[in-house]
Image (spheres, grey):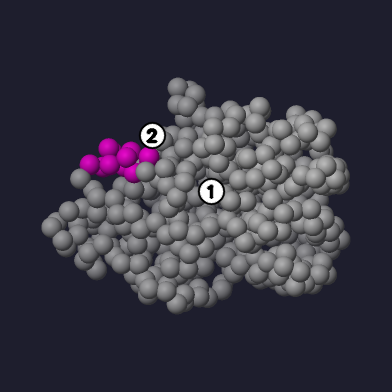
Amino acid sequence: MRRKLYVVPIAAAMTLSLAACGGSENSGGGTSEAGGDKVVDVVSWWSAGSEKDGLEALVKVFEKQHAGIKFVNQAVAGGAGSQAKQKLAADLAAGNPPDTYQAHAGAELDEAIKAQYLDDVSPLYDEFKLRDAFPKTLVDRLSVDGKIYSIPTNIHRSNVVWANTAVLKEVGLDPNQPAADMDAWIADMEKIKAAGKTPITIGMEWTQLNLFENILLADLGAEGYNGLFDGKTDWNGDGVKKAIAHYKKILDLADKSMLGEDWEPAMKPVVDGSAAYNVMGDWALASFNNAQKKAPEDYVYFAVPGTKGTFNFLADSFTLPTKAKHKDTAKDWLNTCASVEGQVAFNTIKGSIPARSDIPAADLEKFSDYQKSAMEDFKKDTIVSSIAHGAAVPAPVSNAMLDALGKFAQGASDEATLQAELAKAAESLKK
C-alpha cells in the first residue's frame, strides 16, 4: 500500500539530546570505544508497569540470542511516549540518534522518513523472512512507496471497553450484553449515573483522543472513518458533528477530576469497582492482572458499542536511524523483536498480540483468553488505523487534535469550535 507523505518540519525540542553510548561516529557496527564491548542503545517509553516488565522479558531473549552485546536501556517516561518523542525529535535533528528507537508504526514516522532520518529496513524483512511471518495486511500498512521503515513487536487494539462486572450488575445491566450503539451505551451510562456511580473515567488528552477516535468509528463506520484520512469523509460534515455530540455527552458523564491523569490512574476506579467503564487499548489488561482480577467475574471487555467487527489497530515498532552508531547490533535487536521467541515473551506480559501470524500452538497457550480472542478478531475483522497512536495520521495532525480536545474538555471551546479545529488539523491530509 502506498501511503502519502505529509511534509511538516520536525520541531526542534528544547531538551538535552540523549547521550550516545560511547560509539565512534563512523563505526556502523556495535563496538563502543570504552573497553571494546559491543552495545546497542535503545530508546523506548516502556519505563514502568507491564511495559517495563515486557521490555525486560524481551531483553532477556535478546541477551540469549545475541550473547556479548550490552543492551543500554534509554527508556524515557511519559504517557504514550510524549516525552520520548520530544527528546527523539531533538536528537534526530541534531544527527545524534540512538541506535534504534520505539515508534508507533504507520503515519507517525512520516516526518522522519521525509527528513531521511531512517533507513529502509525492507532488506531485513527478507533476511528475517518476515513477509511470510507477518500478515500481508500488516506489511501493507507499514509500507511507504514500497519501502518499510520499522519492525513491529506487537499489535494493539484501541477500541476496547473495560467494564467492572459488579458495578454493572448493581445497576441492573447485564455485563454479557453490551450496548449495540452509542445512543444505547450513553443510556446505560445515564442509568449508572442515576444510581450514584461513576459511569466512565477518562484521563489526559491522549486518552481523550483514544476515546474520541472510537466514537468517530462507531458513528461513521469503518468506511466513513477511513474516509477521514483520504478526503472522502468531510471533517466538517454531519457524521463528525454527530460523533462530537456523543463525545460531549460521555464527557459530561465522566469523572472530570481524572482528566489530567495518565491511563493507569484513570483505569484504577474501574479495576477497584468505583466506576463502570473505561475505553483503552488492550495494554489495560495488565491493570486487571496486576490486581489479580479475573474475567468475567470481576471485569468484562468488549468492542466500543457500534464498532463490533472492526479492529482499531496500532503497533509498537523499532526503527533503524540512518546515523545510528551501532547499526550491526541495532539489526540484532530488530531481529529479536521480530522473532517468535521475542514476540511471545514480550506480548504475553504486555497484553498485546504478536505481529507474527505463525506462533506455534504450544506458545499460543501462554496467552490470555482476551489475547486469543484479539488474535482471532485481527484475522477476521475489518482493520482500521488509530489516530491517537500514530497509525492513521502524522504527529503534527494528532498533536493539533490533542490540543483541540484538551481545550474542549476544560470547557474552553464548544462543539462547533472543536469541529472546526479538528477540520483545520486535518487539512494537510488532503494535500
- Judge left or right: residue 90 versus residue 296: left
- Judge left or right: residue 158 versus residue 414: left
Q: Secondary structure at mark 1?
A: loop
Q: In front: 43, or 336?
A: 43
Which of the 4 image quarters holds residue 325? bottom left
Q: Which residue is tagged 2? A: 341
Of the 4 image quadrants, the one containing the C terminus is bottom right
Residue at 65% x, 31% y is 298
Residue at 30% x, 54% y is 72
The residues colored magenta run 57-67
Asked whether residue 343 appears in the rendered view, the answer is: no
Mark 1 closeness class: few <14, some 14–19, many ≥20 residues within 10 Å: many
**The disc labelled 1 sits on which kind of residue?**
Ala
Give percent across and percent down for residue 70: 24, 50
Residue at 34% x, 44% y is 59
| Above-or-below relation of 422 to 380 | below
Q: Earlier in the sequence, mark 2 or mark 1?
A: 1
What is the number of the mark on residue 315? 1
Asked whether residue 44 appears in the rendered view, the answer is: yes
Extreme-left residue of the structure:
35
Give percent across and percent down for residue 429: 67, 67
- The kind of secondary structure the magenta stretch mainly shows is helix
Q: Please say whether residue 65 is one of the residues in the magenta stretch.
A: yes
**The disc labelled 2 sits on which kind of residue?**
Glu
Q: Secondary structure at mark 2?
A: helix
